[in-house]
Image (cartoon, rainbow, N blue to C red):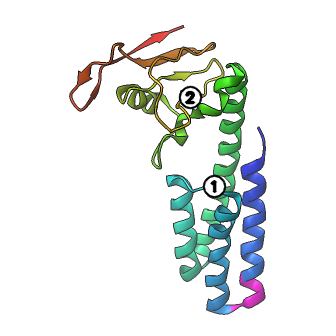
């Protein structure tokens, strides 16, 4: 576990409350809401669906008061810890693969805005022609090339379950036929 998300969450939370308190009133609440988007911009990260929802609840909480701010804050702290844990599993899994392809390997929760790190996301990736797998540590991963195109013929070194398209690629409705295999 890297702690990167947890540390960022703590700094952003403290900074938002400090800005809000320093300015005070409604203007302070609005100013406090700007801290998180600025942190996303500075760190070069984008929120996933969970982060956006938690930020939205916190934003509504700025108007509604502590009844929503406190739960959003605690939920954000827990989500950051989970993101750090999953990020650590993904880093561990990437270390088992050849150095040349590591930059193209991602957790399935990075596949899209609504994505999660799970079996269903791995099946979705395979149905679009990509290779996804569950590492032996439980993390779900997929691989794409430098142009963000899914790779259809990669075989990971270490997996518990492998999801991949049937080769040669065959249409199956608006996607491709795929299969999975257990290690």
Q: Which residues are magenta?
A: 20-24
Pointer 2: residues within 10 angstroms few (<14), some, or many (20+)? many
Q: Is residue 107 left or right of residue 13?
A: left
Judge whether 61 appears above or below 142 on screen: below
Residue 23: image location, x then y, percent: 73, 90
Residue 6: image location, x then y, percent: 74, 52
Residue 138: image location, x then y, percent: 61, 24
Q: Is residue 38 left or right of residue 181?
A: right
Between 178 and 181, the residue placed more toward the observer is 178
Pointer 1: residues within 10 angstroms few (<14), some, or many (20+)? few
Q: Residue at x 62, y 71 (%)?
A: 69
Per the model, the C-alpha gap separating discs 1 and 2 is 19 Å
Judge whether 96 appears above or below 81 on screen: above
Between 41 and 66, the residue placed more toward the observer is 41
Whether the magenta-drawn stretch holds residue 116 is answered as no
Between 72 and 2, the residue placed more toward the observer is 2
Judge whether 117 appears above or below 71 on screen: above
Q: Residue at x 63, y 76 (%)?
A: 34
Whether the magenta-drawn stretch holds residue 22 is answered as yes
Q: Main secondary structure of the magenta part?
A: helix
Residue 92: image location, x then y, percent: 72, 27
Question: Which disc, if any, is residue 45?
Answer: 1
Q: Residue at x 76, y 49 (%)?
A: 4
Q: For the N terminus, which image quadrant?
A: top right
């Amino acid at each position: 576990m890297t702690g990167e998300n947890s540390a960022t969450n703590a700094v952003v939370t403290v900074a938002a409350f400090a800005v809000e308190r320093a300015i005070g009133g409604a203007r302070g609440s609005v100013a406090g809401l700007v801290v998180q988007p600025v942190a996303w911009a500075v760190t070069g990260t984008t929120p996933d669906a969970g982060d956006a929802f938690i930020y939205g609840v916190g934003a509504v909480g700025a108007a509604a008061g502590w009844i929503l701010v406190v739960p959003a804050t605690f939920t954000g702290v827990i989500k950051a810890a989970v993101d750090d844990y999953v990020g650590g599993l993904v880093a561990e899994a990437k270390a088992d693969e050849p150095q040349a392809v590591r930059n193209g390997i991602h957790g399935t929760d990075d596949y899209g805005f609504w994505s999660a790190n799970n079996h269903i996301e791995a099946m979705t990736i395979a149905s679009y022609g990509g290779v996804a797998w569950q590492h032996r540590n439980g993390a779900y991963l997929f691989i794409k090339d430098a142009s963000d195109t899914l790779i259809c013929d990669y075989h990971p070194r270490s997996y518990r379950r492998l999801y991949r398209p049937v080769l040669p690629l065959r249409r199956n409705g608006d996607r491709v036929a795929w299969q999975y295999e257990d290690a």
